[in-house]
Image (spheres, rainbow, N blue to C red):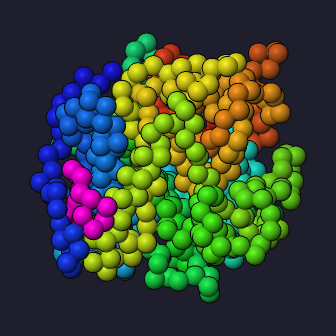
């Protein structure tokens, strides 16, 4: 438990109830509510106003409290995408209309330069490894929780590639701020061996990423970005664009430089108000239609084209086999576009009673901020906040899953009484959008084998959530052994890791909601007898 949670933090002076832009007031955008930005600022927020949120929560005004988190999310998005100085700080002499200056997030540290192939210690902050200094978007994503193989590269989390309407793959990268980097380095959590040693300490052996200290230090922040390769039929004026070097997923990988446009951005912030983290996700407005919007379903999008046939959100079939026998995808053989839709989850009794009201409130705020950005001639007017997850009751216990345990085992899958219940970024969690399904997969992760019957057969309609997925992350707490007592070593000379699970802060080797520690960290090469 964080003893600073009840501190009052972040006193913003830039909120008013009314703003006029070129003769348009907030009332014209759906009505004014507390917590509306009146200007665009480069200040990266530290947290919400805890006392204000607690007061709203105590009086049942959850949707009003949601506005505080959505506003924080938008300010974080704009601050991270603000033009930067050569030192990585916001350049207030420039505005968001600038299209050429590097952004603040580009000076953060790429995960791929922290979690190195053989568990080596990464270079210190500021010496290497920023997105600016290493413009490569070749990402390694692990497969399901208990195993990582070379079959899973350049893919979405725990699945496969997303192919746009031009037949090109989406690329991903993850970066962390200085506060998270220092914590990983100081505790040697960048390697499997370091994680095992950390878990065996006599004390302070539970991962506990730093939270903000009022407005003097930020807490740990992770961001994930999704990029599409720009094509002849894409309007570059509607994307934040850049050039990057990528490595193809082929039998013989090749490097190439491509023009890309930003289509998705996750922002996860560990704060005093939110031990379960604040989870915000943004998308480019042309990505995909809502599944219940017939008008939008008749128009072409970045990842949807009406004339094409096929089920939406369908993972492409694998088409190649690696030397270890695992199945994978090669880019040259995987060019059929994925018909991407955002599955809109209907209100279902006590499963998600506030989600629709929250969604409407978020869309209202989007219209207001997009108007500000349009007035500023910024390309970010073409981006939208999909949603922000946060804990209504921080540290409230999670509910176990099991037969007939839904809906409570879904709404309380994680600690904190998180809202909204469902939240996905369609460019990063395309294939989590199952819609109608047994409740079991949406409950607490019990790591069932593929093809196993669900632990709860209750039928619900749902997708996933940021926190619901990250809740299952663990650290390496040991290595598997053969019957003779020797370590089980793979064909690359590395031991097979055993992971903890579930961020409910018990003695389970949890990773405190960060998948980086499980899916990115590698072990040192192992030689028997040494």
| Magenta segment | 26-39
Quadrant housing the C terminus: top right
Left/right of residue 462 with respect to residue 149 in the rendered view = left
Front residue of this view, candidates 476 and 228: 228
Q: Is residue 222 above or below residue 310?
A: above
Q: Position of residue 139 (x, y in %)?
A: 60, 57
Quadrant housing the N terminus: top left
Residue lying at 71% horizontally and 56% vertically, measured from the top left = 313
In the image, farthest residue toward the left: 13
Instruction: Name the quadrant containing residue 184.
Output: top left
Residue lying at 25% horizontally and 42% vertically, measured from the top left = 48
Q: Is residue 99 a member of the stretch shown in magenta?
A: no
Q: Is residue 445 above or below residue 166?
A: above
Q: Position of residue 167 (x, y in %)?
A: 72, 73
Q: Is residue 29 a member of the stretch shown in magenta?
A: yes
Q: Position of residue 207 (x, y in %)?
A: 44, 28
Front residue of this view, candidates 341 and 5: 341
Q: Position of residue 249 (x, y in %)?
A: 73, 63
Front residue of this view, candidates 30 and 433: 30
Q: Is residue 117 above or below residue 455?
A: below
In the image, farthest residue toward the bottom: 232
Query: Is residue 126 shown to the viewer in this render?
Result: no
Left/right of residue 168 with respect to residue 79 in the rendered view = right
In the image, farthest residue toward the top: 202
Left/right of residue 160 with respect to residue 88 in the rendered view = right
């Amino acid at each position: 438990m964080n003893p600073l949670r009840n501190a009052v933090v972040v006193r913003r002076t830039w909120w008013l109830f009314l703003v006029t832009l070129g003769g348009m007031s907030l009332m014209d955008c759906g009505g004014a509510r507390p917590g509306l930005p009146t200007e665009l600022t480069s200040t990266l927020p530290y947290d919400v106003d805890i006392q204000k949120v607690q007061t709203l929560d105590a009086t049942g005004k959850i949707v009003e409290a949601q506005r505080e988190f959505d506003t924080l999310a938008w300010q974080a998005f704009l601050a991270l995408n603000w033009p930067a100085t050569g030192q990585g700080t916001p350049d207030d002499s420039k505005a968001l209309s600038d299209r050429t200056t590097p952004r603040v997030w580009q000076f953060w540290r790429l995960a791929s330069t922290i979690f190195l192939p053989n568990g080596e210690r990464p270079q210190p902050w500021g010496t290497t490894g920023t997105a600016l200094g290493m413009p490569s978007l070749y990402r390694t994503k692990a497969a399901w929780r208990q195993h990582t193989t070379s079959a899973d590269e350049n893919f979405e989390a725990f699945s496969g590639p997303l192919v746009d309407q031009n037949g090109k793959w989406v690329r991903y990268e993850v970066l962390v701020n200085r506060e998270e980097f220092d914590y990983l380095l100081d505790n040697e959590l960048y390697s499997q061996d370091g994680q095992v040693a950390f878990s065996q300490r006599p004390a302070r052996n539970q991962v506990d990423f730093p939270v903000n200290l009022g407005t003097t230090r930020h807490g740990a922040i992770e961001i994930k970005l999704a990029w599409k390769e720009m094509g002849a039929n894409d309007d570059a004026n509607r994307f934040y664009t850049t050039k990057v070097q990528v490595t193809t997923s082929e039998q013989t990988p090749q490097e190439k430089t491509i023009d890309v446009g930003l289509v998705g951005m996750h922002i996860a912030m560990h704060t005093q108000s939110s031990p379960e983290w604040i989870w915000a996700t943004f998308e480019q407005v042309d990505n995909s239609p809502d599944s219940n919007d017939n008008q939008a379903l008749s128009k072409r999008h970045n990842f949807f084209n009406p004339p094409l046939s096929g089920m939406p959100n369908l993972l492409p079939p694998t088409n190649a086999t690696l030397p270890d026998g695992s199945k994978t995808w090669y880019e040259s053989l995987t060019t059929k576009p994925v018909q991407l839709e955002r599955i809109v989850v209907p209100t279902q009794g006590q499963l998600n009673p506030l989600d629709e009201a929250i969604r409407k409130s978020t869309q209202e705020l989007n219209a207001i901020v997009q108007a500000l950005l349009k007035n500023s001639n910024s390309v970010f007017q073409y981006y939208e906040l999909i949603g922000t997850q946060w804990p209504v009751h921080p540290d409230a216990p999670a509910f176990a899953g099991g037969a007939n345990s839904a809906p409570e085992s879904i709404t309380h899958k994680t600690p904190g009484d998180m809202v909204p219940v469902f939240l996905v970024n369609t460019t990063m969690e395309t294939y989590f959008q199952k819609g109608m399904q047994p409740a079991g997969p949406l409950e607490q992760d019990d790591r069932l084998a593929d093809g196993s019957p669900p632990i709860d057969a209750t039928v619900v309609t749902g997708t996933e959530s940021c926190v619901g997925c990250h809740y299952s992350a663990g650290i390496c707490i040991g290595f598997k052994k053969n019957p003779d007592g020797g370590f089980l070593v793979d064909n690359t000379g590395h031991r097979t890791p055993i992971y903890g699970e579930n961020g409910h802060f018990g003695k389970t080797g949890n990773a405190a909601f960060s998948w980086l520690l499980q899916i990115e960290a590698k072990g040192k090469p192992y030689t028997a007898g040494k």
